[in-house]
Image (tube, rainbow, N blue to C red):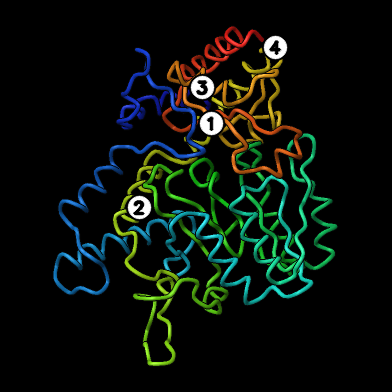
Amino acid sequence: MTATEATALLAELAAEFPVLQREVAGRPLVYLDSSATSQTPQPVIDALTRYYTESRASIHRGVYPLAVEATDLFEGARRRIAEWLGSTPEETIFAANATAAINLVAYSWGRTNVRRGDLVVLTEMEHHSNIVPWQLLCQEREAELAYVRVTDEGMLDLEALDSLLERGPRLVAVAHISNVLGTVNPVAEIARRAHAAGALVLVDGTQAVPQIPVDLREVDADFYAWTGHKAYGPTGIGVLHGRRELLEEMPPFISGGHMIRTVGDDESTWTDLPWKFEAGTSQIAEAIGLGAAVDWIRAVGIERIRTHEEGLVAETLSRLAAIPGLSVQGPARAQDRGSLVSFTLGGAHPHDIGEILGREGVCVRAGHHCAQPLMRRIGTNATTRASFAVHNSLADVDRLIEGLEDVRRVLQL
């Protein structure tokens, strides 16, 4: 399918996002910040509303019909989410977000397995959520952190990775798609190399899951984390997919109700996966909403979404190249990117760019994007980021370019 065909097929989908009916300064809202938080289509909103208005009850414990119905909706969502990405329900754990999912691994697996002098390998393009938990772990365990460098072209240096793998690290943690550079990393190849060196692999799939086809069987990571609010779902829910044998060996991260089998006066035993890692009352509505978001994505077709967004990125890269003083960060080719473009413009601060664009209803992100080590690597403190979703169009790209011309005029660039 060509980009033009994909765009035509997806054009009507913008009407399914209620917030996009808003206007700013008399013009339609252009939302280009889906890498931070995606907008929510009406079918997902409807699923949340139905739970609250028709099926509101706690899950797992009750035997009355309403509780059974709520439980079926919750666990049904888990099954569909697991199936979509090639996982199993037992290996699909709900958490508050991707950050919580990564912390679960760092605290539970990390504090059981990482010892003094061990090595944990990250990359220079990681989000803080995939850096700080490992910093804390290594500080506590007197272990070492090392980073795979990013090339000037915005790609991971796999030779540098191989050099670090020769040192026998315990874990390699890597983003599937960079939230700044847009780089789509070869995570299956990275996992293959890491496993050959005896290391486990954690992939931060937050940007990847809503943007590109993901098959966890092909990726073959030991842990894969992502979040609902970037995948057209609700806030307050993320997912950790883990290798079953590892999850069974790991101790609970958060303890309390629901994750127990028995509680004695002095010790307790734990229930089965995945509930061993889901203490307390679950994110019931959020899981149901995320299940609806996955259903919606599957109905649209993730391949169609990828083709459409890749076309928008290609057009954006082409148009930005004609703007004097503008520099794009990351790979030059759209096919090497996810659905985002980060850039700097002359001496303009990204916050000023974002504020001026915002006056015209064009919503972009400005700042360090929770990736300060990467900002140091590329030699800037902040960038402006435009990120696309299924509802965006070439007209939105036009509005972005038009807005940047206003920025140049206002700031006299």
Q: Image quarter for residue 246?
A: bottom right
- Residue at 75 percent across and 35 percent down: it is 378
Q: Callout 1 environment at 10 Å: few (<14), some (14 to 19), or many (20+)?
A: many
Residue kind at label 3, given as amino acid type: Glu
Closer to the eye: label 1 or 4: 1
Closer to the eye: label 3 or 1: 3
- Residue at 34 percent across and 59 percent down: it is 283
Q: Nearer the viewer, residue 409 or 78?
A: 409
Q: Earlier in the sequence, mark 1 or mark 4?
A: 4
- Check disc 4 and report the residue beneath it: 324
| Distance Cα–Cα, label 4 vs label 2 | 45 Å
Q: Position of residue 365 (x, y in %)?
A: 53, 31
- Check disc 1 and report the residue beneath it: 365
Closer to the eye: label 4 or 2: 4
Closer to the eye: label 3 or 2: 3
Residue kind at label 2, given as amino acid type: Gly
Q: Which mark is residue 355?
A: 3
Q: Is residue 262 above or below residue 104?
A: below
Q: Earlier in the sequence, mark 2 or mark 1?
A: 2
Q: Callout 2 environment at 10 Å: few (<14), some (14 to 19), or many (20+)?
A: many
How many numbered circles does the render carry?
Answer: 4
